[in-house]
Image: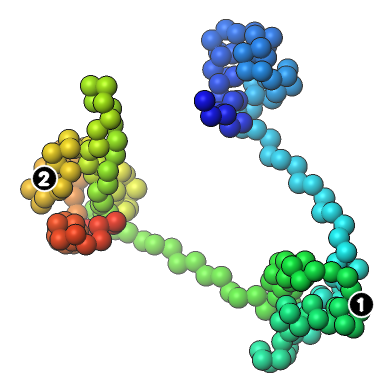
Amino acid sequence: MPAMSKVELYGAIRRDHRGGMSMRELERKHGVTWRTVRKALDSSWPEPRKKLPPRATGLDPYKPVIDEILRADLDAPCRQRHTVTRIFQRLVEVHGADVSYGMVRYYVAGRKSEIFVEAGKAPLEAFVAQTHQPGHEAEGDFGDVTVRLDGELVTCCLFSFRLSYSGKAVHRVSPPAARKPSSKATLMRFAHLPPDTRPLPSVTLYDQLLRRRDSGGDHREGEAQ
């Protein structure tokens, strides 16, 4: 039996405690200490791991040198900027550093972006919010889902439908005989959607999704609007 994650362990302890088990019984059943039981009862989420302080390395005395090189490269033409290989060679040849290339590459990869931010030259990050009109746009997709019928695992067709404005999602599972969807079967699924998903958007582009699936094309996702 695979080991439980800490979240699953906390959930099991809390369920057993609600069932009337004492602290000592919880310790014996789950093989944990009273501190773990106490933490699980106090919070359903484990505490995040404490980050260990970075270990000292042979590169530490030369990090200011690397930072100076990276800052000088901010105003240098692209072709004249230092590569990781060139920085490593300068450390070894000029400063006599006894470090590996991997240590230099790892430090430069993380420090270069930080220096760009400190100098105010980091790439601008933009966010474009999506807007949808009520009842105007929806997304649909098909996939396979395995369910247990009469004690046997059977692969059926899963139909997923989500309205873009409200985020309301509906899922329907069809028997194995209906794994290959048709336009008629899809309209039947629409007819059985809950009343709060109406009025339904036009299915013009959704029909294209069905035709792509029937022809063996990509059917990962389609939109109807």
Looking at the picture, tell me which residue is in the foreground, 108 or 188. 108
Res. 52 visible in picture: yes
Looking at the picture, tell me which residue is in the foreground, 211 or 45. 211
Residue 66 place in picture, x, y as percent: 82, 76
Does dot 1 land on a helix, a strand or a loop? Answer: loop
Looking at the picture, tell me which residue is in the foreground, 77 or 154. 154
Mark 2 or mark 1, which is nearer to you?
A: 1
Q: Residue at x 25, y 37 (%)?
A: 155
Residue 37 place in picture, x, y as percent: 68, 20
Q: Earlier in the sequence, mark 2 or mark 1?
A: 1
Left or right of 92 in this view: 192: left
Please tell me the numbered disc located at residue 111. none
Residue at the far left: name it: 184
Residue 150, by quadrant, is: top left
Please tell me the numbered disc located at residue 185. 2
Q: Residue at x 71, y 91 (%)?
A: 80
Mark 1, residue position:
96
**Mark 1 and mark 2 in contact (Cβ < 8 Å)?**
no
84 up-or-down from 139: above or below: below
Q: Residue at x 15, y 47 (%)?
A: 180
User: Of the residues shown, which amino acid type is indicated by label 1?
Assistant: Gly
